[in-house]
């Protein structure tokens, strides 16, 4: 017997019992929500009403990528598997458009509503995701309030004008971020020119260390490396990258600040804007 068949049989008694109850109105706010993706975890924890969010993904417990670890510990933890999510009997499942399609499809075949959120590529996308989460949770007023705080903080950061130093965001394996990426937009909002894009490298392309050296940016931005050994991250400790950090300016931005399109991206904007001010002071000396 297939897993789908087992789940359908398990669901049958529940469905029969529920036939005697009046179905909730279609526009009613979901009362039992399960999130199976880190980015939806974060937005849901920021916006859900008391007791509305039942479960978040295990990634929300990882302090390297999650700024809401303590809040996550107050919820049931799931591992993104259809079987465990089904047994939680959610009214709504929150997923990413990059979540496993097989899992999403199985949940939908079992009659569970799944709302998918696309990854954010710009700060404007972050605004859209906040409002989308507010709509699906029936928490539009809370979303409007969160968005107002987001906009006010962003406006204050962008009011800090000045020279625009040249910077490169350098990821594991030498990947860079340019136009059309969230980290690239963060760099722009913090007041930097993207030297990778100026050198002809778009988001997701690999910039060799030799090109990085020849590009000669004012700032090289990297993420914090994970514990243990990783060949993909060895490039971040290469003498070329270390030389930029020691001789000019280097910034390490926590992944939790920019891995997801949430209001926490403004922490990265704020940190980078402070680095930009330090560069301006240094060059003015």
Image: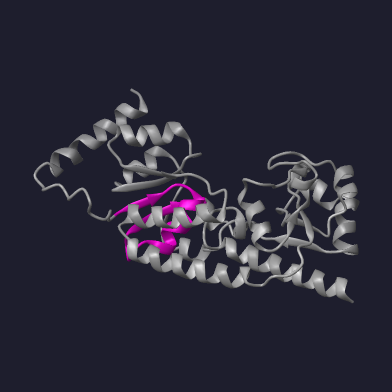
User: x, y (%) of residue 54?
Assistant: 36, 56
User: x, y (%) of residue 109?
Assistant: 31, 32
- The one of 46 and 17 positioned closer to us in this rendering: 46
Task: Point out the residue furthest to the left here.
Answer: 20
Residue 85 placement: quadrant: top left
Residue 226 appears left or right of 35:
right
Inspect the magenta stretch and tell me whether residue 57 lies in it.
yes
* Vertical arrangement, residue 8 with respect to residue 215, above or below: above
Q: Measuring 24% from the left and 37% from the top, which residue is drawn there? A: 11
* Vertical arrangement, residue 218 with respect to residue 7, above or below: below
Q: Measuring 78% from the left and 56% from the top, which residue is drawn there? A: 167
User: x, y (%) of residue 274?
Assistant: 71, 71
Q: Measuring 43% from the left and 31% from the top, which residue is drawn there? A: 102
* Vertical arrangement, residue 9 with respect to residue 279, above or below: above
- The one of 169 and 57 positioned closer to us in this rendering: 169
From the image, which quarter does the C terminus lie in?
bottom right
Residue 29 appears left or right of 128:
left
Asked if one can make out residue 230 in the rendered structure from this viewpoint, the answer is no
Count numbered badges in the picture: 0
- The one of 72 and 199 positioned closer to us in this rendering: 199
State which region is magenta: 32-58
Residue 224 appears left or right of 101:
right
From the image, which quarter does the N terminus lie in?
top left
- The one of 29 and 54 positioned closer to us in this rendering: 29
Asked if one can make out residue 82 in the rendered structure from this viewpoint, the answer is yes
User: x, y (%) of residue 225?
Assistant: 73, 54
Q: Measuring 62% from the left and 68% from the top, which residue is drawn there? A: 158
């Amino acid at each position: 017997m297939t897993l789908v068949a087992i789940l359908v049989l398990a669901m049958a008694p529940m469905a029969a019992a529920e036939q005697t109850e009046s179905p909730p109105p279609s526009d009613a706010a979901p009362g039992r929500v399960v999130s199976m993706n880190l980015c939806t975890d974060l937005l849901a924890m920021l916006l859900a009403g008391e007791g509305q969010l039942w479960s978040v993904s295990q990634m929300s417990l990882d302090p390297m990528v999650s700024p809401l670890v303590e809040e996550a510990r107050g919820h049931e933890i799931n591992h993104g598997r259809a079987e465990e999510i089904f047994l939680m009997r959610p009214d709504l499942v929150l997923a990413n458009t990059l979540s496993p399609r097989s899992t999403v499809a199985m949940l939908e075949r079992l009659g569970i509503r799944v709302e998918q959120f696309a990854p954010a590529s710009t700060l404007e996308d972050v605004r859209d995701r906040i409002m989308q989460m507010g709509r699906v949770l029936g928490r539009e007023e809370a979303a409007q309030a969160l968005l107002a705080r987001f906009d006010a903080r962003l406006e204050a950061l962008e009011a800090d004008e000045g020279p625009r130093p040249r910077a490169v965001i350098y990821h594991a394996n030498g990947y860079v971020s340019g136009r059309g990426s969230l980290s690239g937009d963060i760099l722009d909002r913090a007041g930097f020119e993207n030297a990778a894009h100026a050198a002809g490298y778009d988001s997701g392309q690999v910039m060799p260390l030799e090109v990085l050296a020849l590009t000669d940016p004012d700032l090289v931005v990297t993420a914090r490396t994970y514990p243990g050994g990783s060949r993909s991250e060895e490039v971040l400790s290469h003498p070329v990258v270390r030389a930029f950090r020691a001789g000019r300016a280097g910034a390490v931005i926590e992944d939790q600040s920019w891995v997801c399109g949430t209001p926490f991206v403004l922490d990265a904007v704020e940190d980078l804007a402070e680095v930009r001010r330090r560069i301006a002071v240094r060059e003015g000396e």
